[in-house]
Amino acid sequence: MNSAAARTPASDLPAMFTAQGQAVGKGYAIAKAVVMSAAALEVPHYRIAAEDVDSESQRLLSAMASTRDELRAMVDQLPVDAPRELAPILTVHSLLLDDPMLTQQTCAIIAERHYNAEWALTSQGQMLVEQFSQMEDEYLRERGADVRQLVLAEYRERQEAYRRERAELEALLDAPAVTLDGINVRLEANIELPEEAELALKAGADGIGLFRSEFLFMGRTDLPSEQEQYEAYSRVVKAMKGKVVTIRTLDIGADKTLDGDATVATNPALGLRAIRYCLDKPEMFATQLRALLRASQHGQIRILIPMISSMNEVHASRQAIESAARELEKSGTPFARNYLLGAMVEVPAIAIAIEPFVQELDFLSIGTNDLIQYVLAVDRGDAEVASLYDPMHPAVLRLIAHTINAADRAGKPVAICGEMAGDASVTRMLLGLGLKEFSMHPQQLLDVKKE
């Protein structure tokens, strides 16, 4: 995700910057950027000893000199297509670092108040902002407005082009997804909350390929009751009007935890998570399974078990479902056994030894996000190694192809529900591997259908 934004301090003088990050959704948004922080700039605040004043001042000056050199290097390395205004803006910033009003006054704060360097610099910066806010120089104000308008104009053009592209894709909404050789392809949606089912239908989804049930559990201090879960699952089943609904059982652990449920695992991604967590908490798991069985009265559901790595977990899951059914029978609560049982293929062990799982289960869903991380030993959330996260790595593609082929031989459906499914740049490659079922964010459905 590349986003350019204009940050307007009280002085109305803009600071232009580009933020790098992982994409969450496609498109262009133009608005004020809000920094979710208690302060304009969060820095350490502490007082230093009197004898440390000189060394702290030198630390400040060294840091400012280093930053100034980095800014000048950035000017020298700007690409040829960079906005014309960017080099002057960076140059002005480097000159500000040499301004005696900034350097000398900040050193004075260190000496007089015994603030640490970071605290002193932000304090002086805030004072300067207040002074600039009183400026009456219309020329400076107008130059700031000119820069903002140039940036906004560029992004308005990109935004309009994106709108035109989406409008063209809308023509594909009711068209079937069929390959050139006549193979029907299912394009399903990933959702996190029940109300998103209606949006998935409007986006043209053939079904729900992944309902992440853990979002019913998160952000609260108590567990959702059986009735609450039943109503949520039923709402999705009814909304889809007979289309496929795949509900993943609680996938907690690694990057998702329940409030108040602290983990002490050295590596949560390899610890007590997903099906391991559920089997370790049988009462909680039974509550969810009873709700799922009750919801299956309204239409068939696919129960998807995450992070399966052994046949023992498959058998334990089936036993837990049957136990939940017996509890419902005993209480006289209406339910149905109108379900299919499947597993996420995200642990290399199941992908490598897929054959017995294909025979035992009714369907499979490849979770490429975790599969790639486990195969390559890369945490994509770690900026230092995120560049090594490679969906096209031969080892990853071999395991995906192996799973698809094994499922195809057994006549069992297999889908991909990870980010690869919604990446239109790899759609044709996945079709070439034999994939016929994709599940993705509803916004990505038409992009993939176009391929």
Image (cartoon, rainbow, N blue to C red):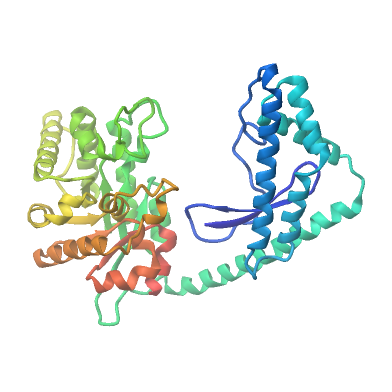
Q: Nearer the viewer, residue 310 or 409?
A: 310
Where, by quadrant of the figure, is residue 286 drawn? Answer: top left
Q: Nearer the viewer, residue 276 or 379?
A: 379
Q: Judge from the rendering whether residue 408 lies leftward or rightward of residue 205; answer left or right.
A: left
Residue 224 visible, this orientation: yes
Is 112 located above or below residue 134 in the figure?
above
Where, by quadrant of the figure, is residue 254 drawn? Answer: top left
Q: Nearer the viewer, residue 370 or 418?
A: 370
Is 299 located above or below residue 393 in the figure?
above
**Which residue is at the far bottom?**
181
State the residue at coordinates (86%, 52%): 140
The quadrant of the picture occupied by the C terminus is bottom left
Q: Judge from the rendering whether residue 22 lies leftward or rightward of residue 127; answer left or right.
A: left
Is 365 located above or below residue 280 in the figure?
below
**x, y (%) of residue 35?**
62, 41
Is 277 located above or below residue 420 in the figure?
above
Q: Nearer the viewer, residue 448 or 153?
A: 153
**x, y (%) of residue 364?**
19, 56
